[in-house]
Image (cartoon, helix red, strand yellow):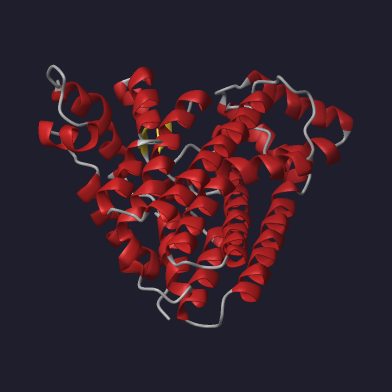
Amino acid sequence: MESVAEILSEYARIVNDALRKYIPRRADEAYLKSILGEAEYRYEVESLNKSIFEPFWDLVDRGGKRWRPALMLMVYEALGRDPREIAPLTVIPEAIHNGTLAVDDVEDGSEFRRGKPCIHRIYGEDVAINMGNTMYYLPLTVLEKLGIPPEKKLKILDEYVETMLRLSLGQAMDIAWHRGLVEKVDEDQYLQMALLKTGALAGFAAKIAAIMAEASEEEAERVQRFAELVAVAFQIQDDILNLAGDEAKYGKEIGGDISEGKRTLMVIHALRHLPKAEAEKLRRILDMQTKDRGMILEAIQLIRKAGSIEYAKEVSRKLAERALRILHETLPEGAGRRKLEALAGFLITREY
């Protein structure tokens, strides 16, 4: 079998083609009419290009692994179908994901995304927020353009509403924690937050594939669960890379989670296992939300001292193992399942 990087590259081409087809680099009146109908007065298109499509494509063109839509295609293939049949639907999770990145970066006060300044640093916070919000809804127009049967469309829309609610509630928890609105958070609460914030969209991608493949309700729920658990393992690895990764590969500032005061699994573990004085020191640095590199490095050293990075790696590995057990119980052996297995392994061992 090809390497995971090669497989993802192949799927990324399919996803990128779909994005280009259904989300224009520059909108025109014909496009607006296709999604909004005839204007009652007159559309002004250039403002939309400057504030939605240009910043969206700025972010998308920076790359990204496209693993959520790739997972959708892999699940569909593992269910015995041709993934090219649902290629246009990959626009839904990928556009939503990029929308969440733009909004999250504003909420987190982040500086860099995929090796370049965040969208709000270039275009402004108002543009970034509105563009992100637009991408929560715009990709759903694909359902109409493709003429998806009403029963399947309704199921997808039901899953979409639940997904966006889960995303929003998970993000609310994350924000409250790094704002210091809640004093103590435990590991189970962190995992639940990650399941909502990160797991929901991956699960939605897998569920779309299952709905379109006409899988049984049990199969659909199980592949969705597989995807959610893999996504949480991915999130933990992302948190690890933020503290211990190679900045050139990672594409974001190392230690950004410290300067944002994030309560990651590693932070929660370290606060519980460090001696009291050192735990309080770490808590103070996090609450300061400092940009001082010396203090950020001191916080990282405290987290290392507590063994929290190795602990997080082990939790991520166990989540992936649990996900794979579900996968093996649900899907038959074959090339499609092997691709999903390889993807799960890659997401918890990657260096970028």
Report the residue at 19% width, 39% height from top.
Answer: 25
Residue 29, above or below 238: above
Q: How many marks?
A: 0
Report the residue at 80% width, 28% height from top.
Answer: 184
Name the image quarter holding residue 216: bottom right
Name the image quarter holding residue 175: top right
**Residue 294 visible in image:** no
Image check: 68 left or right of 313? left
**Where does residue 140 sit, x and y in percent of width and height?**
35, 43
**Where does residue 299 sit, x and y in percent of width and height?**
68, 33
Q: Closest to the observer: 17 or 61?
A: 17
* Residue sitting farthest toward the right: 276
**Residue 198 visible in image:** yes
Residue 301, above or below 231: above
Q: Closest to the observer: 147 or 245?
A: 147
Image check: 13 left or right of 294? left
**Where does residue 139 sit, x and y in percent of width and height?**
33, 42
Image check: 223 left or right of 95? right
**Where does residue 94 sit, x and y in percent of width and height?**
39, 48
Residue 296, above or below 162: above
Report the residue at 11% width, 31% height from top.
Answer: 29
Report the residue at 57% width, 24% height from top.
Answer: 292
Quadrant holding the N terminus: bottom left
